[in-house]
Amino acid sequence: MRYFLLIFNLISIEGYGQQINYVSSIKPIIESHCIPCHSKGNVGSMPLTTYKEVSAYAKMIQYVSGNKLMPPWKADHGFSNLKFFNYLSEREIALIKDWVVNGMEEGNILKEEKQKKTPAITSIEKPDVVFEMKEAFVQAADYTDRTQVFVVPSNLKEDMHIEGLEFVPGNRKIVKACSISIDTGTIGTRYDSNDLKYGYGSFASVGFVPHQYIWYQWTADMGATFFEKPYIKKIPVGSKILFHITYAASNTLEKDQSYLKCKTAKNMAGSKLIHSSILFTSNDITNGPFVIDVDEKKKFFATTTIDEPIEILSVMPQGQYACYSWEIYAIDSITAERINILKIPQWDAHWKKKYDMALPIKLSAGSKIFGIAYYNNSEENNNLIILPPKKIKNGEATRDELFLVQYDVIEVEAQNL
C-alpha cells in the first residue's frame, strides 16, 4: 500500500507520470489569468512573474483560487454563452493545490522556459485619435480607494465612428478600472466646475444618465478592444468623454494622467451602431419600493418589454455592498424561448465588470427581459461596510444601494449612423 501511495503522489493529475512543477503546470496558469494585473508596476498588490514570487505567495494563491476569489471573474460560466472568460477551471484549481501540497517543485527552467511565453496584451499601435486627461490627478497617500470622473472634451467637428478602443492608464499602480460614457449635454461640465479637484468625485457612476452610459469599460486585465464587424461605436460631434476611473488605495503620493486611443472605422457599409444605455433601474422593479430594512434578505424583480427587435451585445449589472447576486434572462415574444443572459451567484462590488455575449442575443419586438437581484442587509453578509446594518435606500453613495443594469444593444430597425 505504501508503494502504491508513493507512485500515486508522483503522478500528476494531468494524467502522465511526472510530478507537477511550476514551469510546466503552474506558470501557464499564472500567465493566462494573473500576470496582466500582478506584474511590476501594475495594480495587483504583489508581482507573480517568477517562481520565487509565486512560491512566496503559494498558499495564498491556493486559498483565493480554491475559494474562487481570484481571478475576479464573477459570472456563472455555465449559465450563458459569454466570451473573454477569465476564470480557473476545476482542473487548474486542483493543479495549484496539488503543486502547493507536494512541495512546489520548480521544474527544468532551461528546458521548458523557452516553450512558455507571456501572452502579449493587444494594443493599438497607431491610433487615429487620442483623448487625454488635460492634467494629472493626484491620489493622496492616505490608503483610501477613490473614484473620480474626468470630463474630456472631444473637440470633434463631425461625428466619429470607432472600430477599436484602448484605454491606457497613466499609472498602472493605482488605476483599477475605467468606465467611459459619452455626454452630449452640460451636466458633467457643471459637476466638474463645482469640484475643487480636477474632475469630480462620484462613487457608483457619473452621477447622471448621459447620452451613452458606460459606452466602454476597461479593467486592469484588458488591452485593446476591437469590435467585430459589422459593429461600431460613435462619438457625436461636440460631445464630452467622461472617464470614470477607480483608483486603488495607496500609501504613497501617486499621479495619473490616463488617455483613450481610438481606431476609426474606415468602411461604413453595412455597419451596425452600438448603443450603450440602461436596461433596468429601480423604477422597473415590480415588487418595490426599493428599500431594504435592517436584517432583511430580499429579492427584487424587474421586467421590461422591448418595442423593436434588438441584439444584445453585453450587459453590466450594478450593485453596492448589500447586493448578493444577479440573474438576467429574456423570453422571446415569438418563440417563447427562455434565453439566459447573465448570472452572478456571488456579487462583489469591488469587481464590477461588463460581460460580453459570445454571440449577439437577438430578441423579437414584444419580448420581455427579466432581472432578479438578491440583497442581504444582515450581519451574515461579510461585504457590508456599515455594521451594525442600517436601513438602505436607492442611491449612489457608498451607504446606499443600486438596482441597475447597463447594456450594449443594437436597435435593429432604428439604425442611425
Image: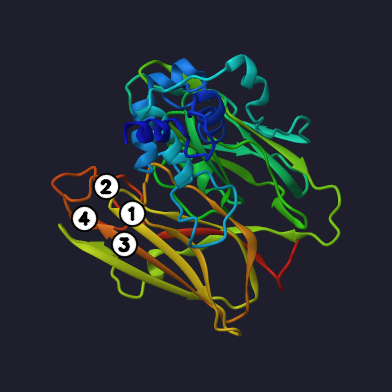
Q: Earlier in the sequence, mark 1 or mark 4?
A: 4
For mark 4, give the secondary structure. loop
Give me the C-alpha separation between circle 2 and circle 4. Answer: 11 Å
Count neighbours of disc 2 (C-alpha within 10 A) and say few if under 14, some if 14 to 19, many if 20 or more. Answer: some
Which tag is nearer the camera, tag 3 or tag 1? 3
Tell me, yes or no, if residue 115 can be seen here. Answer: yes
Q: Earlier in the sequence, mark 3 or mark 2?
A: 3
Residue type of the residue flagged with mark 1:
Gly
Give me the C-alpha separation between circle 2 and circle 1. Answer: 8 Å
Where is mark 2, residue-wise? Answer: 399
For mark 3, give the secondary structure. strand
Q: Identify the image quadrant of the N terminus.
A: top left
Q: Residue at x 38, y 30 (%)?
A: 6
Residue type of the residue flagged with mark 4:
Asn
Give me the C-alpha separation between circle 1 and circle 4. Answer: 15 Å
- The percent position of residue 234, horizontal first and vertical second, equals 71, 52
For mark 2, give the secondary structure. loop
